[in-house]
Structures are given as structure tokens and as C-alpha cells.
Image: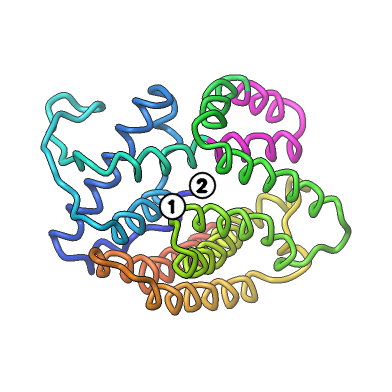
Amino acid sequence: MFGYVKPFKDQLKVCEYETYKAAYCTLCKRMGKKYGHIARMTLSYDFTFLAIIMLAMHETDPQYKRKGCVYNPFKKCVYISDKDDVFDLVSAAPVSSVYAKIVDNIEDSKGLKKFRYRVFKAIFSRKYEKSIKLFPDIAKTMLDMVNYQIKVEKKENVGMDEAAEPTAAAMKQLFSLCTDNEIQGRILAQIGYCIGKWIYLIDAVEDIDEDIKSGNFNPLKNSSVESAVMTMNVCAAEAGNALELLEIKRFGGILRNIIYIGLIETGGKAVCGRKEAKE
């Protein structure tokens, strides 16, 4: 959705980083095959994290092949050659979420910026329609999130927890769709909820100064960056607790790196970047 949920590379093993890159490149390739070249631009670390979780729970180990990169014909990339069920499902999520984000941005923006988002909406409409046909539950989840968000933002004095609820609820639903096991589904739903809330809050932290100038909605106007960061850290901790209950068969090191280290590092950089911009 926004590309914040990523590993801290310095503390990944080389083999773990290569596995993560393979998942990222495979998702990129699958999105291009299913939704066209432009759809690849919607790829984010957030959904690579979802793909890694699904691969970690899969009954069999992924198989790998080295092929040319679509963006660099002189480069060879490692791709996961099977697990089409994983990458077909996950590839629908970025397309649906970006379309939903565009709809939300149209509601929030004015003037030329609003016009640009309307152009983007026209470009992505057909891709979104295809995602509806292939994975209607995912498409509906993302559009419901936007409609819910629009209602919340029209209220007065909205707190950050209430403002983050649509994104958290959408990610909860999305993650729960990734398994047929009821117990594991509930655990995934908890991870998704915490990650979704964390994503919304870090985006609010990064945008707060610009939103104050432009008059756009931001729940931190009624709260503070410090309280948002505290809540983000709680979300990361709760996501980690849920991860330990998940029946994963592989890639535990990558997932723990993302949740225990990556979220904290990314959150810290967002706060530091905001301070540096002010100085």
C-alpha cells in the first residue's frame, strides 16, 4: 500500500536477503503478467511481506529459477518458479489498494492535484476491474476501506485510533483471506490489523507538516507525532506476538527481521526525516 513494511537489510543473512528479493521480483513479474506493465509500479514492500508470510506457511518449499529482469535486460534475477496461487492472490492486492488510494486522494485533493488523481483513476480502472473478476473479496475489501475512511474523515475531532481503523480493518480482512485454516486465519487477521494501523500512522507522521500547510485531513492535528510513534511501537510488538503463534515452516528469520527490526527502523527514520526537514 505505501511501502513501509520492509526488512532491515543490515541484519538479514545473505540467503535471507536473496530469498526476499526473489519474492519481490516474482511478485513484480506476476503483476506485469496479470495486470500489465504499469501495474508493476504499484508493487510495494508491504505486499512482499504478505507474500513471504504465505510462502512461510505453504506446505512445500518454493523452487527457484534465474531469468532476465524485465527492467534491465543485462541483469539476471532469481524468481520463484512455482507457488502461483500465492503470487496470483497477492498481486491483486496492490492493484486494488492503489486504486482505492487514488479514490481517497480524489476526495482529499483540490484543483490540479485532484485532476491528476482523476487521470490516474482512469488509467487504473480497467486493471481494478480485472482484479474484481479474479479476486472480488480483495477488491471489495480495499474499496470498503476507502468508503469507510471517507466517512471517518468527515467527522469532527477524529482521533488517530479512529482514523487508522479503516486501514487496519482492511489489512485484517486481507491477511485473513490467505489461509483456509480458521485458527491461523485469526492469527493472520491480528497481524494484518496491527500492520495496517502501523502503516496508516507512519503515513500520517510523514505527511503531518504538509497536511497542516495544505489543510488536508490528518488525525495528528488533534494528537501528536510522539503519541503516534508510541502507538506504532505497540502495534509492532503485538504483530510480533501474533507472529510467534503462527505455524510457519520457513522464512522465520525474514519475518522476524521485518516486524521486530524493520518496523522500528523505518518508523525512526520517518521521525528523524521530519525533524531534519524542519531544521
Q: Position of residue 92 (x, y in %)?
A: 47, 37
Image vertical order of residue 28 relative to residue 73, above or below: below
Residue for point 25% across, 61% down:
9
Say few, some or many: other residues with alpha carbon within 10 Å of mark 2 (under 14 / 14 to 19 / 20 or more): many
Q: Is residue 279 visible?
A: no
In front here: 269 or 249?
249
Inter-mark Cα distance, 1 to 2: 6 Å
> For the image shown, how many numbered marks are present on the structure?
2
Q: Position of residue 96 (x, y in %)?
A: 55, 37
Does dot 2 land on a helix, a strand or a loop?
A: loop
Q: Report whether 118 appears left or right of 198.
A: right
Q: Residue furthest right?
A: 156
Q: Which residues are magenta?
A: 96-121
Q: Report whether 142 appears left or right of 112.
A: left
Q: Report whether 256 appears left or right of 126.
A: left
Does the magenta run of residues contain 113? yes
Residue behind mark 2:
1
Residue 10 in which image quadrant: bottom left
Does label 1 or label 2 sit earlier along the sequence? Answer: 2
Callout 1 touching callout 2 (CB < 8 Å): yes
Residue behind mark 1:
46
Does dot 1 land on a helix, a strand or a loop?
A: helix
Q: Position of residue 106 (x, y in %)?
A: 71, 33
Looking at the picture, which amino acid does disc 2 mark?
A: Met
Residue for point 39% across, 26% down:
34
Q: Position of residue 12 (x, y in %)?
A: 21, 65
Residue for point 38% across, 23% down:
37
Residue for point 63% across, 38% down:
100
Image vertical order of residue 199 relative to residue 124, above or below: below
Q: Report whether 35 appears left or right of 73.
A: right
Q: Is residue 49 visible?
A: yes
